[in-house]
Image: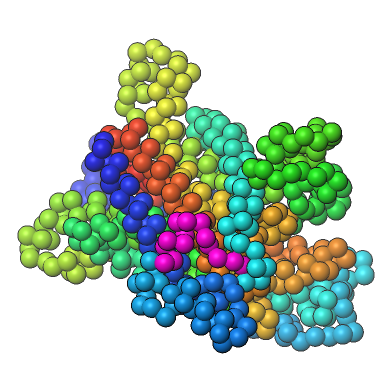
């Protein structure tokens, strides 16, 4: 167990180290001035350039530069955005929670819709209901997420006018920024029309969450259905049946637990899909999240922002994925590691 | 009187034939493959099929609705866009670029991925272990993020976005190939090869690759649907194909400005992408079921 933990920590440290090295080398690989790419400041005069180079140790060897970069990263001094000159740490601490919030709700929706549907489809497989579930899964997996978001906007915002088009909450409500999670902030905030603000924020959330969740739901349905079908065909289920247990008893006592285990790591792999879809959806709905922020950064050629944004998102996703993999490995050690993630 | 049959006449279909027999039992899979073939035909024959040049602007007919609407014209079946370009021709060329480039990049990604995966699967020890685990964890980095980094370094354009997606697809192939090769290396027929004195290269080419082929086809269909969605998403974000190249996602985002007065300009490219991905997914699903059923029989 300790051995396993050490191995996973080792893997995590190694991967993050590579990501940091990549993000450092990006400052050299991006077009333009390395000094601007690493500091975010465009030097106005020669003296300022020399001074800045001395600060960022660009006149020293590359290892010293990297060490200085690492020190800055750890101490939270991430430099400034070259387009807005605001501290990147500050901008990310506003944008990142917005994305996490969106992704969490989308993940919850897909778990609570996808897994039960997958179970029902798997137990009654090759029945009309299962046929419907599979069709739904294949069709919604094929939707390009940007087109889906546009369809939602056309139907619910422009034609019917039920739901708001963009943003997180109406500008009428002045929500003080504390944690960055809008629903939590509203609950904590000391404003008179709290309930209205909460409902308004929920209405803003519906469409982006639905657009992101649809694809993930389809994937979860597929995983769960496959897993439960495999599990219910195994020998010990037959044995339990021959002893006279009902299907209900077998399913809730054995099938449910054993078929949930292998899909946990598969879900971890969906976090990256969620992020990819969230980036596109955020751009369409003007959601002030990190995906939108990175895409705006590339439109404005704001290389320091892209560098740090990439580092933050990838470190977050990698850490989460490795942690979930470790957990699933720890609670299910019997399974051969090469069978993992192969439903 | 009892009859006897001296020569046992049995039907022994080949493995590929088995897959086809299983595959054609599903009507949906057949319809899906028909649509897929249609898109293949469009990708190859687009210049012959398109009635107009996709980039020629005709200022006399701007925002003409499709032919099935009242004031549409039969000379432009899908209508025209804000610059008077024929939407039907643009859709055909767009399918050609999106579909064709996706197939191309999946082929490249599969080749590189299989090479790396075989290397990691056949070899043991620290080198292959590091490669395995690092690739597995780097696989977690979102595709679009990798694409944005590549586009930031190399600049926008169809080729650059293709490189980005190739890079993002490779780990999947490495993962699948490695798992498969690891499993196969434990089997007896590989041991037989080894006892006969075959080297790693020969084992790969003559024993592992033929049995891996089906897995590769299924994995490629999966990758192809991801590739199409990604390449059109990049086009949609204006990071992929640029103006003279007609790409479905890019033309969708260009027509967003007139989406309210001309909704078909948004609907048609999106529907084409959807149909393409749907047919690929149905065919992939059919192939997977056929493979599984073949193994059961």
Residue under the point 83% across and 76% down: B82
- Considering only vertical position in the picture, is B237 above or below A104? below
Q: Which residues are magenta?
A: A68-81
Residue A149 x %, y %: 71, 54
A336 to the left or right of A86 = left
Residue under the point 39% across and 69% down: A66
Residue under the point 80% across and 85% down: B57
Residue A103 x %, y %: 60, 46
Q: Quadrant of residue A64?
A: bottom left
Q: Residue furthest top?
A: A244
Residue B160 x %, y %: 53, 77
A58 to the left or right of B232 = left
Residue under the point 69% across and 55% down: A288
- Considering only vertical position in the picture, is A282 above or below B3? below
Of residues B181 and B53, the one nearer the viewer is: B181
Q: Quadrant of residue B278?
A: bottom right
């Amino acid at each position: 167990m300790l051995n396993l933990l050490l191995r996973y920590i080792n893997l995590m440290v190694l991967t993050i180290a590579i990501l940091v090295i990549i993000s450092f080398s990006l400052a050299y690989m991006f077009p333009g001035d390395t000094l601007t790419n690493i500091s975010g400041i465009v030097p106005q005069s020669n003296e300022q350039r020399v001074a800045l180079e001395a600060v960022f140790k660009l006149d020293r060897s590359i290892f010293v530069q990297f060490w200085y970069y690492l020190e800055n990263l750890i101490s939270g001094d991430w430099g400034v955005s070259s387009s807005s000159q605001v501290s990147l740490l500050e901008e990310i601490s506003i944008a990142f929670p917005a994305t996490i919030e969106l992704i969490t709700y989308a993940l919850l929706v897909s778990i609570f819709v996808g897994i039960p549907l997958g179970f029902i489809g798997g137990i009654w497989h090759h029945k009309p209901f299962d046929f419907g579930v599979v069709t739904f899964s294949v069709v919604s997996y094929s939707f390009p997420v940007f087109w889906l978001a546009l369809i939602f906007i056309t139907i619910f915002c422009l034609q019917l006018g039920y739901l708001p088009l963009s943003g997180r909450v109406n500008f009428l409500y002045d929500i003080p920024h504390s944690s960055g999670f809008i629903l939590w902030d509203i609950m904590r905030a000391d404003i008179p029309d709290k309930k209205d603000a909460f409902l308004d924020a929920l209405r803003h959330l519906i469409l982006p969450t639905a657009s992101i969740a649809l694809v993930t739901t389809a994937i979860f349905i597929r995983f769960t259905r496959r897993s439960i079908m495999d599990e219910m065909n195994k020998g010990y289920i037959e044995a339990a049946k021959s002893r006279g247990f009902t299907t209900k008893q077998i399913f809730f006592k054995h099938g449910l637990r054993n078929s949930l285990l292998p899909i946990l790591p598969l879900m971890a792999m969906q976090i990256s899909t969620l992020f990819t879809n969230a980036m596109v959806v955020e751009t369409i709905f003007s959601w002030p999240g990190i995906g939108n922020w990175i895409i705006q950064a590339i439109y404005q050629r704001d290389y320091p922002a892209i560098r740090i944004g990439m580092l933050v998102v990838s470190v977050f996703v990698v850490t989460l994925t490795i942690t979930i993999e470790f957990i699933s490995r720890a609670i299910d050690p019997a399974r051969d590691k090469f069978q993992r993630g192969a439903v | 009187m009892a009859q006897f049959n001296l020569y046992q006449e049995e039907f022994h279909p080949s493995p590929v034939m088995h897959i086809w027999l299983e595959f054609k039992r599903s009507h949906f899979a057949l319809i899906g493959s028909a649509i897929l073939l249609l898109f293949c035909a469009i990708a190859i024959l687009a210049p012959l099929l398109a009635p107009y040049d996709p980039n020629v602007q005709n200022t006399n007919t701007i925002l003409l609705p499709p032919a099935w609407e009242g004031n549409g014209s039969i000379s432009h079946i899908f209508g025209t866009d804000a610059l008077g370009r024929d939407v039907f021709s643009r859709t055909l060329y767009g399918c050609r670029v999106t579909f064709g480039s996706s197939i191309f990049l999946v082929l490249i990604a599969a080749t590189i991925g299989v090479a790396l995966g075989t290397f990691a699967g056949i070899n043991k020890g620290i080198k292959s272990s590091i490669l395995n685990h690092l690739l597995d964890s780097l696989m977690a980095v979102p595709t679009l993020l990798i694409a944005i980094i590549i586009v930031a370094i190399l600049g926008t354009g169809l080729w650059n976005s293709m490189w980005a997606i190739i890079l993002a697809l490779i780990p999947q192939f490495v993962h699948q190939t490695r798992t498969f090769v690891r499993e196969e290396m434990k089997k007896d027929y590989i041991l037989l090869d080894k006892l006969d004195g075959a080297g790693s290269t020969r084992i790969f080419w003559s024993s592992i690759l033929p049995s891996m082929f089906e897995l590769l086809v299924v994995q490629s269909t999966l990758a192809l649907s991801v590739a199409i969605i990604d390449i059109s998403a990049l086009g949609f974000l204006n990071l992929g194909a640029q103006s003279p190249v007609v790409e479905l996602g890019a033309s969708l985002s260009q027509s967003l400005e007139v989406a309210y007065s001309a909704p078909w300009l948004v609907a048609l490219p999106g529907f084409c992408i959807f149909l393409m991905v749907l047919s690929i997914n149905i065919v992939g699903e059919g192939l997977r079921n056929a493979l599984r059923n073949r193994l059961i029989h």
